Image (cartoon, coloured by chain):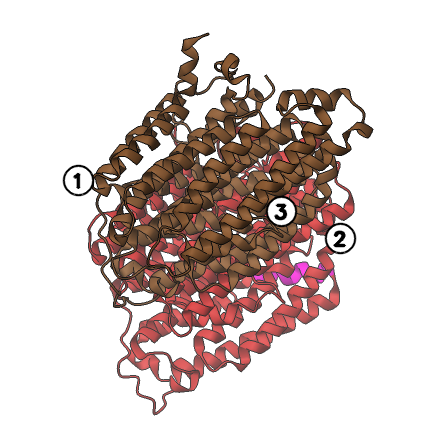
């Protein structure tokens, strides 16, 4: 059987992980081999990026029968939207490894990280809903392990909480998927769970579709999280090890957004448009609510957790804004935010590693001890707040434009919130990093060479995307256009 | 008389002769438990191999129909079910050997009784005549009654054994009464004749038959521990020796379902209509009550017992939808039985394997930090838990997938939703064990834990591999039998019923 590039990207980490777990190798070897694997995967994904055709079709298709009696296929493909997220995942994970290098974790930690990579890329690339569900649930297990074994504080409770929470969401989605499959079978006489087949169903009534729509949305809303499904977030983020927070915030949350665009949008275009105002409302509300919650936090990790949730709410508003600016901006912000937030959590992890867990007022004066870290921190922060010249600026501008076009008042509210959030972030930066205080920060070490190379190449990408957004936007433009014009039929913004 | 018919009876004969041989060997002191287990194993494996002779074909023969007057039928359906049952016997023998040696209380009779029970179960799925069915059911049950009482150290064994004996006999009487009523209505106890009667007569003539069929269904619900007949199972499962619990929870359930599928599919189309409403609620209550029980257990053995009630509920979902989708519902029942068989047999088998001389590891707390002591065993146990919870990449997920798809397809979406709810609750009590095994530091284990060597761990590991294989399927190696193979053969089994 021929194995395609996408399969290779998905399953290489899995295979390596199992081999490493079974072989009697030490932690260091495991880590080094795992890192090398992620680099290989990164190179493979680069080749996808350069060979990507500028169309709205699915590319690099792979299609094999899996469970034929129920028409379940092993079906993979990539389009503009999933391609940029694929690039994001394969770029960020090696970076994560560089920053987690020092952590004295057992080899299970690194093996789990590889398993997570398989789970997320698999979910990202599968076009069969059962296959998608398969990966979507599977990626939970290594996260469960990472938080449960290597977390801090009340880790066991928070692990069970996030697991049960997300499984609840996924099970609702599973019922919806099965219902769609049966509807397709009743209409066409054959079984199929292919996305491209299920969109052809015409027999479902509007009420049925609405139920199914929410079945899917609950699963994704929990993962993102959209207000009011965020209650797992804080505990999990503060009790996770740095790697866990990094994966959850930078990658898994984005997959929730991806799921909405990939599956909910084409399957339920009518409901998507119908309920868009509510989700825009929830998004903007979340932007403000989580923003205020972030202000209240004393712990720097918790603060970033809320600010991350705030941005994710903003992205949600963007994808439901139903115009090309909002959608493109959201797609762009997924990438921008994942990079910046991933980078920030890794840097915060470094600070925690050196100084222990501290509140914001217990920090201060790090700049002198660790100038490189300070610069990197600042660059990531610039992108988060959307300073011109970073990719954050481009994406937030696009979403705000989209929201303005959607509704003037919502546009004004979101724009001003973004500005207030920006000023707050700088205040934090000043307190935690710049200003010299009496606190003992002598244990703080600066970034080492690997980390410097890693974080500044990320910063370079952030700047490049901010200065020449066109390089990246033109790859996804046809896909977004396709979503809006062909599927949602809302027309293109003039 | 055709003597080549004997080949079809070979599984039955082999197990029956094996049981008698073991009975004769067991008083001989020089035959250790280990040796006896090899004897039991060889008879079982002969039975299993002779079953595979006709594998992959649709056939239906009534061997020695002159002597047995068509009471026994050997068809693909029976072959399929008896293969699972015999496999259950084999696994029980192997995971049991260690336990029986350690617990130092069971003599060789246990294998003899086990094979008698397997014999009864095979006869149960092969019989097409109701009195034969009754006799088969009683052979299987009576062997189990005595097996449950074998654990001398467990103070509750007498209670468990007697409770099961009395309630089981009560259910047996229901069954007999049902047969009598059906006979009164149709003048026959042969399923084929009954089916003929049902198709040729109007519904006014069927009051007696319906009443009789209902009584038989009640026996069925009792034996599979469905609501409201579930309470015996918790105590009986707890007081029985672990390998026997495993055997009862998985294999006996397979046999009972094998019988009732034949009974319902061939004869009782009418009855299905009357019963589907009641079974609908029974399925819901079974799932919810089982989940409720399982959540509050501190003993792993009791949790697995309670969760077996929940799994009965899932099977009943498919049983309700059998009305509108005969073939796919039966297929999904068969598939789910295999999935449940592998997972629960594995979990119970692991529990009974790690029991040591002085300490039975049966509570959640006993597993605290287990992964640090025995990482591979903990990994296998996790696989069994994940499969029971129906997490993708295990066979349990595929099994649930079929059941829920069938429920939605036949219009019982609400059943699927309740099933999902029960699945969701089950995540809690299955994941709790995984969390305990992995998230706590290495403890001081009470008693020694047997190492990972010998045949029992191999058998358990094989089941773990099968669970994963059954969940991932045959995408990679297309000529190796996978999920599709299981479904296709299960369909053949269904078709052979109507030959």
Chain identifier, colour red: A
Residue hosting label 1:
B30
In the image, A48 versus B188, the foreground residue is B188
Circle 2 Cα neighbour tier, 10 Å, few/some/many (<14 / 14–19 / ≥20): few
Name the spot of residue B287 as percent of width and height, x first: 59, 52
In the displayed structure, B334 sits above or below B233; it is above
Disc 2 to disc 1, C-alpha distance: 80 Å
Residue hosting label 3:
A175
Disc 2 to disc 3, C-alpha distance: 22 Å
Name the spot of residue A252 as percent of width and height, x first: 48, 56
In the image, the segment drawn in magenta is A394-406
Does the rendering let one see residue B80?
A: yes
Residue hosting label 2:
A274
Label 2 SS: helix
In the image, B288 versus A386, the foreground residue is B288
- Labels 1, 3: one chain: no
Q: Colour of chain B?
A: brown
- Chain under label 2? A
Residue located 28% across and 73% down the image: A446
In the image, B182 versus B247, the foreground residue is B182
Label 1 SS: loop
């Amino acid at each position: 059987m021929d194995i395609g590039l996408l399969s290779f990207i998905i399953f290489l980490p899995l295979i390596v992980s199992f081999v490493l777990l079974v072989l009697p190798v030490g932690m260091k070897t495991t880590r080094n081999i795992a890192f090398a694997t992620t680099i290989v995967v990164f190179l493979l994904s680069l080749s996808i990026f350069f060979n990507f055709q500028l169309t709205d079709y699915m590319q690099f298709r792979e299609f094999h029968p899996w469970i034929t009696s129920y028409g379940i296929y092993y079906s993979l493909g990539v389009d503009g939207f999933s391609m940029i997220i694929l690039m994001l995942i394969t770029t960020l994970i090696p970076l994560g490894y560089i920053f987690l290098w020092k952590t004295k974790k057992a080899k299970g930690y690194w093996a789990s990280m590889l398993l997570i990579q398989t789970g997320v890329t698999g979910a990202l690339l599968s076009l069969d809903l059962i296959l998608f569900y398969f990966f979507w649930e599977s990626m939970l297990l290594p996260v469960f392990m990472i938080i449960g074994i290597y977390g801090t504080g009340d880790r066991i409770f928070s692990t069970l909480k996030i697991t049960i929470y997300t499984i609840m969401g996924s099970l609702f989605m599973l019922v919806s998927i099965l219902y769609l499959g049966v509807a397709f079978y009743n209409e066409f006489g054959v079984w199929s769970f292919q996305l491209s087949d299920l969109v052809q169903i015409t027999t479902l009534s509007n009420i049925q579709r609405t139920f199914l729509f929410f079945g899917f949305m609950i699963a994704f809303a929990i993962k993102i999280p959209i207000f009011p499904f965020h209650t797992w977030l804080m505990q999990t983020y503060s009790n996770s090890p740095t790697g866990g927070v990094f994966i959850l915030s930078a990658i898994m949350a984005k997959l929730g957004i991806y799921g909405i665009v990939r599956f909910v949008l084409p399957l339920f275009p009518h409901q998507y448009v119908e309920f868009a105002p509510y989700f825009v409302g929830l998004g903007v509300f979340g932007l403000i609510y989580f923003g205020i919650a972030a202000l209240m936090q004393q712990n720097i990790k918790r603060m970033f957790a809320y600010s991350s949730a705030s941005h994710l709410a903003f992205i949600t508003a963007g994808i439901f804004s139903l115009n090309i600016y909002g959608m493109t901006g959201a797609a762009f912000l997924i990438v921008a935010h994942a990079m910046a937030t991933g980078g920030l959590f890794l840097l915060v992890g470094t600070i925690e590693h050196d100084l222990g867990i501290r509140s914001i007022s217990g920090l201060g004066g790090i700049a002198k001890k660790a100038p490189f870290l300070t610069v990197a921190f600042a660059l990531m922060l610039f992108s988060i707040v959307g300073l011109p010249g970073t990719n954050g600026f481009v994406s937030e501008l696009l979403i705000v434009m989209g929201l303005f076009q959607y509704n003037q008042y919502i546009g004004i509210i979101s724009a001003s919130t973004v500005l207030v959030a920006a000023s707050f972030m700088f205040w934090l930066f000043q307190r935690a990093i710049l200003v010299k205080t009496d606190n003992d920060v002598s244990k703080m070490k600066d970034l080492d060479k690997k980390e410097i190379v890693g974080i500044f190449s990320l910063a370079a990408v952030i700047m490049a995307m901010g200065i020449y957004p066109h390089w990246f936007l033109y790859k996804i433009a046809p896909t977004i256009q396709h979503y809006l014009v062909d599927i949602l039929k809302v027309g293109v913004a003039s | 008389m055709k003597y080549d018919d004997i080949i079809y009876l070979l599984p039955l004969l082999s197990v029956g002769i094996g049981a008698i041989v073991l009975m004769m060997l067991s008083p001989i002191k020089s035959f250790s438990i280990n040796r006896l287990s090899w004897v039991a194993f060889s008879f079982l494996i002969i039975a299993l191999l002779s079953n595979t002779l006709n594998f992959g074909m649709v056939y239906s023969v009534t061997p020695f129909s002159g002597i047995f007057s068509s009471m026994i039928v050997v068809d693909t359906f029976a072959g399929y079910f008896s293969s699972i049952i015999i496999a259950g016997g084999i696994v029980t023998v192997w995971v049991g050997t260690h336990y029986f040696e350690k617990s130092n209380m069971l003599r060789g009779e246990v294998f003899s009784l086990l094979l008698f029970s397997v014999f009864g179960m095979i006869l149960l799925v092969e019989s097409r005549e109701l009195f034969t069915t009754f006799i088969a059911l009683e052979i299987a049950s009576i062997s189990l009654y005595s097996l449950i009482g074998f654990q001398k150290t467990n103070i509750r064994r007498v209670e468990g054994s007697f409770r099961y004996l009395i309630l089981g006999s009560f259910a047996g009487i229901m069954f007999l009464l049902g047969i009598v009523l059906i006979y009164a209505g149709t003048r026959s106890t042969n399923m084929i004749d009954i089916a003929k009667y049902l198709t040729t007569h109007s519904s006014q003539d069927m009051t007696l038959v319906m009443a009789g069929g209902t009584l038989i269904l009640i026996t069925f619900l009792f034996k599979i521990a469905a609501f409201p007949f579930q309470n015996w199972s918790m105590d009986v499962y707890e007081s029985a020796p672990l390998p026997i619990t495993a055997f009862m929870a998985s294999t006996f359930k397979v046999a009972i379902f094998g019988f009732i599928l034949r009974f319902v599919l061939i004869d009782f189309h009418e009855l299905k209509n009357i019963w589907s409403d009641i079974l609908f609620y029974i399925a819901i209550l079974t799932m919810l009550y089982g989940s409720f029980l399982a959540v509050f257990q501190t003993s792993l053995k009791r949790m697995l017992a309670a969760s077996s009630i929940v799994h009965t509920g899932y099977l009943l979902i498919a049983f309700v939808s059998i009305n509108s989708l005969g073939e796919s519902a039966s297929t999904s029942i068969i598939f789910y039985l295999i999935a449940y068989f592998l997972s629960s047999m594995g979990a119970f088998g692991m529990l009974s394997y790690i029991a040591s001389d002085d300490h039975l590891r049966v509570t959640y707390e006993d597993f605290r930090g287990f992964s640090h002591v025995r990482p591979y065993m903990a990994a296998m146990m996790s696989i069994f838990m994940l499969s029971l919870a129906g997490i993708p990449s295990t066979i349990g997920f595929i099994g649930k997938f079929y059941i829920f798809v069938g429920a939605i397809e036949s219009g019982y979406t609400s059943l699927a939703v309740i099933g999902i709810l029960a699945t969701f609750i089950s995540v809690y009590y299955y994941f709790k064990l995984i969390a305990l095994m992995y998230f706590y530091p290495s403890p001081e284990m009470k008693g020694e834990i047997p190492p990972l060597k010998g045949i029992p761990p191999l058998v358990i590991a094989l089941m773990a591999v099968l669970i994963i294989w059954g969940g991932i399927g045959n995408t990679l190696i297309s000529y190796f039998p996978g999920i599709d193979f299981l479904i296709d053969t299960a369909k053949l089994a269904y078709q052979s019923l109507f030959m």
